[in-house]
Image: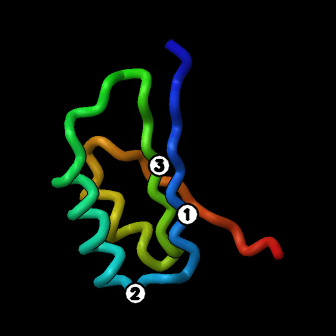
Amino acid sequence: MKPIIIIANWKMQHSLRESITLAEAIEVGMPRLPDWFSMVLCPAFTALPSVHPLLRQCQLGAQDVFW
């Protein structure tokens, strides 16, 4: 099966606390993912160190500031 990747770019829409809460909710609410499915969460740069340890099924991505 062809891999499916979903990338969630949060832009700068969430505070640090909101980013942590959202990452926790996504991880808890997701069923066990098959090997061919990947989800990447891209929170604001300031939330990367706090969100990373919470992720078990999702991968962590980063966004740049390119216009």
Front position in the image: 21 or 49: 21
Residue visible at 22% across and 63% down? 24
Label 2 crowding class (10 Å Cα cut-off): few <14, some 14-19, many 20+?
few
Q: Quadrant of residue 48?
A: bottom left
Label 3 crowding class (10 Å Cα cut-off): few <14, some 14-19, many 20+?
some
Relative placement, left or right, of 11 versus 17 is right
Toward the right, the furthest residue is 67
Report the amino acid beneath label 3: Val
Q: Quadrant of residue 63?
A: bottom right
Q: CA distance from mark 2 to mark 3?
A: 19 Å
Q: CA distance from mark 2 to mark 1?
A: 14 Å
Mark 2 or mark 3: which comes first in sequence?
A: 2
Q: CA distance from mark 1 to mark 3?
A: 8 Å
Front position in the image: 42 or 26: 26
Q: Secondary structure at mark 3?
A: strand
Toward the top, the furthest residue is 1
Residue visible at 42% across and 30% down? 37
Res 9 label: 1
Residue named by callout 2: 15
Residue visible at 19% across and 53% down? 29
Report the amino acid beneath label 2: Ser
Residue 11, above or below 8 = below
x, y percentage for residue 62? 57, 60
Q: Secondary structure at mark 1?
A: strand
Residue named by callout 3: 40
Mark 2 or mark 1: which comes first in sequence?
A: 1
Residue 48, above or below 56 = below
Quadrant where the image shows the C terminus:
bottom right
Relative placement, left or right, of 34 versus 43 is left
Res 17 label: none
Report the amino acid beneath label 1: Asn
Mark 1 or mark 3: which comes first in sequence?
A: 1
